Amino acid sequence: MENTSITLAKGLRDGIPIGLGYLSVAFTFGMMAVDGGLPIWSAVLISATNLTSAGQFAGLALILSGGSFLEMALTQLVINLRYALMSLSLSQKLDPAVNTLERMAIAFVNTDEIFAVSSGQPGRLTKGYMFGLAVMPYIGWTGGTLIGAAASTILPAFIRSALGIAIYGMFIAIFIPPAKKQKSVRVVLAAAVFTSCVFAFVPVLNTLSSGFVIIICTLAAAALGAVLFPIEEGGSNYE
């Protein structure tokens, strides 16, 4: 029988770098939420019940701008649809002993980084390892939000403004490395930027709410990438 304590301990160790990374990004989220007018408890509650950086930042923009529930639902569906695909893939590596309720809990904490680390593990994934892996990221994300939200009420305005660009630095750090290696990423990225500029500067189009702009830009860029760079089943698309 597999030693669950060992897999739990390994999961905790593997989750520490993820948790530290989440801490800084969540700090920015908490700060932006409170600066936008949300109470500290609300910002923390959002992070405690969600574990999606891009989805939360997009959702925060919609909340602060008074977007509709439909706009919020569609935006979150488009941005977070990848998690459903990642969860389906990850479920194939889970130990058969992991029951449905436990799989649902794992799906809740399945982020890009957790998926990447767990997918790289040899053999079957136990529930002990998966729950251990999620502990530090969850604490980092929720705790970072709390710290950022609380600090927003103390820090001077110029420091809050400077820290507000941290999320953009994170996104740049995410897409620049693969864009250097893959033509497909560069093309999709350029398409997304071009489409965003169209909706930002073209009359009439620039009156569309941010939520629907995100949906249209995401779908348009993804569709272009799928048409120009199809991936054969069982293959890869690194150029």
Image (spheres, rainbow, N blue to C red):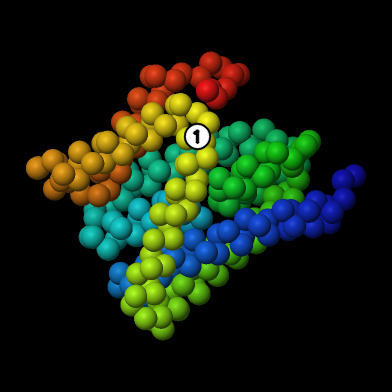
Q: Nearer the viewer, residue 118 or 170?
A: 170
Please identify the residue farthest to the bottom as the structure is shown: 154
User: Identity of the amino acid at label 1?
Assistant: Lys
Position above or below: 37 against 106: below
Q: Residue furthest front?
A: 180
- Location of the N terminus by quadrant is top right
Q: Please state which of residues 179 and 107 is positioned toward the viewer in this rendering.
A: 179
Along the line of sight, the residue nearer the viewer: 219 or 41: 219
Residue corresponding to mark 1: 180
Residue 66, percent across and down?
Answer: 23, 60
Q: Within 10 Å of the Cα at label 1, are there few (<14), some (14-19), or many (20+) other Cα atoms?
A: few
- Say whether residue 100 is left or right of residue 171: right
> Looking at this rendering, what residue extends furthest in the right direction?
1
Where's residue 13, x and y in %? 75, 57
Q: Quadrant for residue 235, please give it.
A: top right
From what the image shows, is residue 24 above or below residue 186?
A: below
Res 39 → quadrant: bottom left
Mark 1: which secondary structure?
helix
Report the number of discs: 1
Whether residue 41 is visible here, answered yes or no, is no
Q: Is residue 213 visible?
A: yes
In the shown orientation, is residue 26 left or right of residue 101?
A: left
Q: Quadrant of residue 93?
A: top right
Q: At x 87% / y 46%, what residue is drawn?
A: 2
Where in the figure is residue 164, as x and y percent of width and height? 38, 65
Q: Residue furthest left?
A: 203
In percent of the image, x 38 and y 19: which residue is there?
A: 227
Residue located at (59% from left, 47% from top): 113
Residue at (49, 48) in percent of width and height: 173
Residue 60 locus on image (x, y percent): 34, 60
